[in-house]
Amino acid sequence: VRAGALKAYRTTDDGREQVTGFYFPGELLGMDGISVGVHASSAKALETSAVCEIPFDSLEKLSTLMPDLQHHFFQLMSRKITEDQLLITLLSKSSADERVASLMLSISTRNARRKLSATEFRLPMSRVDIGNYLGLTVETVSRVFSRMQKLKLLTADNKEICILDPRGLQAMANLA
């Protein structure tokens, strides 16, 4: 992703959309197609976005010429595997508060990695997409945001987020 934000999703057998991830500038998507040459997910822009397509065979050729590129690619793949494992754990064991807090912390960390503000950012995705991704109803997501605001952990003005208490948010996410 060069600019903007995308969501990855799968269409279930009954035709419903299941959000499987959110991607921001500098992040790779489409690695699910490496092993069999077919992508398991589709992607949709959440806002005006730009992407750079890198055919895997070109990446393979370049990585043999540039070992640092191969190392960087392996780091990105490892980070993605770790994030996916954390998501599976989060969805299988965590409360709604922990799920939403963890997503806000993930976006915060990813912004910081891109040298953007870790405490003030705009959510490119809707509450519906957040709920779909986290396995929650949109009403539950809204209630959690309201609770976070009452606890003065963050402010949420529509899609504008300001994290007021990162440690409190970590405690809510059960990461402290």
Image (cartoon, helix red, strand yellow):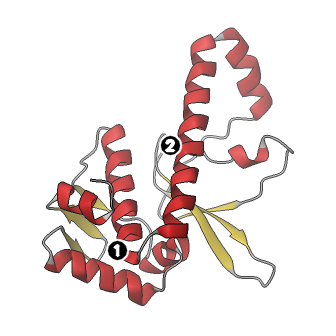
**Residue 54 figure quarter:** top right
Vertical placement of residue 74 versus 1, above or below = above
Q: Amino acid at mark 2?
A: Arg
User: In 3D space, how far apart are the residues under numbered discs 2 and 1 (Cα atoms)?
Assistant: 31 Å
Vertical placement of residue 3 versus 171, above or below = above
Q: Which residue is mark 2?
A: 2
Q: Position of residue 64 (x, y in %)?
A: 72, 13
**Residue 141 figure quarter:** bottom left
Q: Secondary structure at mark 2?
A: loop
Q: Secondary structure at mark 1?
A: helix
Query: How many residues crowd mark 1 within 10 Å: few (<14), some (14–19), many (20+)?
Result: some
The outermost residue toward the bottom is: 139
Residue at 63%, 12% in the rendered image: 66
Of the image marks 2 and 1, the number of the one nearer the N terminus: 2
Vertical placement of residue 134 versus 122, above or below = below
Query: Left of 163 or right of it: where is 40?
Result: right
Q: Position of residue 100 (x, y in %)?
A: 38, 69
Q: Does residue 109 appear anywhere in the picture?
A: yes
Query: Left of 148 or right of it: where is 127?
Result: right
Give the camera-side residue of 45 and 60.
60
Vertical placement of residue 4 versus 116, above or below = below
Count of number-bearing discs: 2
Residue at 40%, 89% in the rendered image: 139
Query: Left of 60 or right of it: where is 5?
Result: left
Residue at 34%, 61% in the rendered image: 104
Q: Which residue is mark 1?
A: 97
Give the camera-side residue of 5 and 105.
105
Q: Position of residue 136 (x, y in %)?
A: 49, 81
